[in-house]
Image (spheres, rainbow, N blue to C red):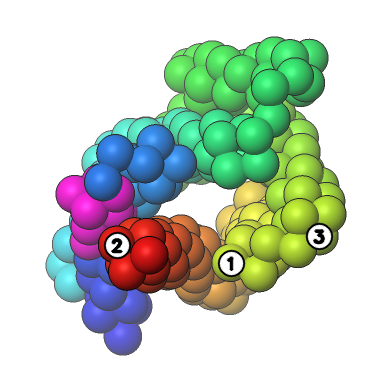
Amino acid sequence: METIFDIGYLGAVIILGALMIKNCRGDRQFYLFGIMGVILGVGDAFHLVPRILALHAGDMESYAAALGIGKMISSITTAVYYTLLYMVWRIRYHITDKNELTIAVYAMLALRIVLCLLPFNQWTSLDAPLSWGIYRNIPFVILGVILMVILYQSAKKENDTAFQWMWLTVVISFVCYIPVVLFAETIPAVGMLMLPKACAYVWAVAMGYRAMKQKQVLSGYLDRFKVIR
């Protein structure tokens, strides 16, 4: 069941992302959203594909190195995903100022990447230190909180029904992710929270795809109206 779910998740975000890149008609907002989906799926594949192979082989130890490196790549690409979502937010809501916020977002991304690349994480070990799992996630959580707040505030202010729940996808993903970081080693069942986390990502990418199609349909109607006039 986990294998089927993982394949479905990866397929959904990558396919939806690729469709947005292909069909965005030059709309930078949805082009970036498509890149978000593809980066998310490809990055997570580095971790999930070795996990699928390890589960079917019944031998996690033999795949420890691949799982660890894949987890590191996934940790970086998810941060890139949220940084791109921030860029989508700026385009969608026509944000031209708030340069300090942009600096903070990029700083959290850079810090996250640097912390993930440090050898102290011991990615390839089955007994990686919890302390570094916490350290590398501090800037990631800060990045997530920033996205939660600005997406909620902007959607509410602009009455943006297409993106009204985008903030909630961020909340769900972090609410599910943080317990896994803290307790998955001692309470393996907590790892099941990664399933609703993945669903939140699919929801977010699907929301972006649906918003693109709605905008294109509306644009088509307006073009026809102009021709009639």
Secondary structure of residue under mark 1:
loop
Q: Nearer the viewer, mark 1 or mark 2?
A: 2
Image height check: is 75 above or below 58? Answer: above
Q: Which residue is mark 3?
A: 156
* Residue pictured at 68% horizontal, 22% vertical: 96
Please identify the residue farthest to the bottom as the structure is shown: 1
Q: Name above or below for residue 96 compared with residue 201.
A: above
- Residue 98: x, y in percent? 78, 21
28 or 64, nearer to the observer: 28
- Residue 187: x and y in percent read 64, 68
Of pointers 1 and 2, the one earlier in the residue sequence = 1
Can you tell which quarter of the image residue 1 is in?
Answer: bottom left
Residue visible at 51% across and 21% down in the picture: 113
Residue 74 position, x and y percent, is 40, 41
Count up the numbered dots. 3
Residue at x 19%, y 49% (from the top left corner)? 22
Looking at the figure, which quarter contains the C terminus? bottom left
Q: Going by the image, does 132 lie left or right of 123?
A: right
The amino acid on which the numbered mark 1 sits, given as a three-letter code, is: Ala
Q: Amino acid at mark 3?
A: Lys
Q: Marks 3 and 1, Cα distance to the nearest angstrom?
A: 11 Å
Q: Is residue 15 magenta-colored?
A: yes
The residue that label 1 is drawn on is 162
Q: Residues within 10 Å of mark 3 (few under 14, many from 20)?
A: some
Q: Secondary structure at mark 2?
A: helix
Camera-side residue of 76 and 162: 162
Mark 3 and mark 1 lie on one chain; the one further toward the N terminus is: 3
Say which residue label 2 marks.
Answer: 227
Q: Which residues are magenta?
A: 13-24
Lower sequence index among marks 3 and 2: 3
Q: At 66% across and 41% down in the image, what residue appears?
A: 93
Q: Amino acid at mark 2?
A: Val
